[in-house]
Image (cartoon, grey):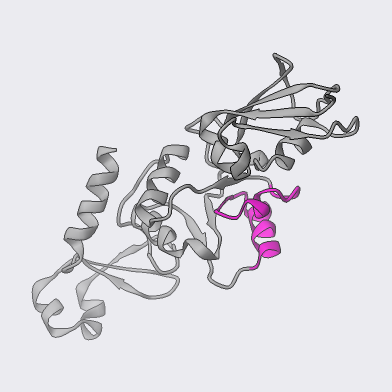
Amino acid sequence: MSDVVVRVAPELAFLLHPRDRPARQRRLAFDPDATLGHLVQAAGVPWTEVGRLRLDGAPAGRDARTRPASVVEVAPVTRPQPLPAGGLLLDVGLGALARRLRLLGLDAAWSNTAEDAALVGRARAENRVLLTQDRGLLMRRTLPHGALVRGHRPDDQLADVLDRFAPELAPLTRCTACGAPLEPVPKAEVADRLPPGTRRTYDRFSRCPACDRLYWRGAHARRIDALIAAVRRS
């Protein structure tokens, strides 16, 4: 047979068609013009999830070409990987994850109305890595940095992102609504905006310079502290 076999590591098997997952490989028709990058994505694996490649047993690059009956071996991306200077950008389906990342002090841009083309354009313009669970979005050629987020629950997604990028954390330093860095504000300046119970009980406050929201360690602090502690343990 002249088909080319794309064989993936166990960590990537879930990206293949269900019928191909047990063997962890996909057979594709030989095409002399197809690069390894094209073949790997045709098998269902976005290039953002690919680490080392081997072609017929030898290391190979994305632009290499196969021969009839070649075998392409695909390893997962090495973790942790560097985080681009611009930070993170999340697609519309990851709003809960964006809030958790901001709680930990990470620059996590998110909008519930951004379309795919706008997300790719912003990732390029601001040098951000696009986090998504949409494989098609990650296969866009113009996307500079991307990552497929694993997990269905926000906490599982958070663990995956932190494991992949291992960023430095600065908990409770960003606005969870818009992501801007918080600034300390004297109580006297915001006293008229506080509920009576909060005004009596708390003395330290922060304010978002972008959207003007106020923050203090209220009744929700224990839940936030538990999240932060769990992250640091892991």
**Which quadrant is the N terminus positioned in?**
top right
In front here: 34 or 230?
A: 34
In front here: 1 or 168?
A: 1
In front here: 192 or 151?
A: 151
Q: Decide: is 149 above or below 209.
A: above
Q: From the top left corner, tell me how far across and down residue 148 is, in percent.
A: 55, 47
Q: From the top left corner, tell me how far across and down residue 10 is, in percent.
A: 52, 30
Q: Decide: is 62 above or below 185.
A: above
Verify whether residue 107 appears in magenta.
no
Q: From the top left corner, tell me how far across and down residue 101 is, in percent.
A: 40, 54
The quarter of the picture where residue 97 lies is: bottom left
The quarter of the picture where residue 223 lies is: bottom left
Q: From the top left corner, tell me how far across and down residue 160 is, in percent.
A: 43, 43
- Identity of the residue furthest to the right in this view: 32
Name the residue: 30% across, 73% down: 214
Name the residue: 65% across, 68% down: 115
Name the residue: 18% across, 68% down: 218
| Count of numbered marks | 0
**Which quadrant is the C terminus positioned in?**
top left
Magenta range is 115-143
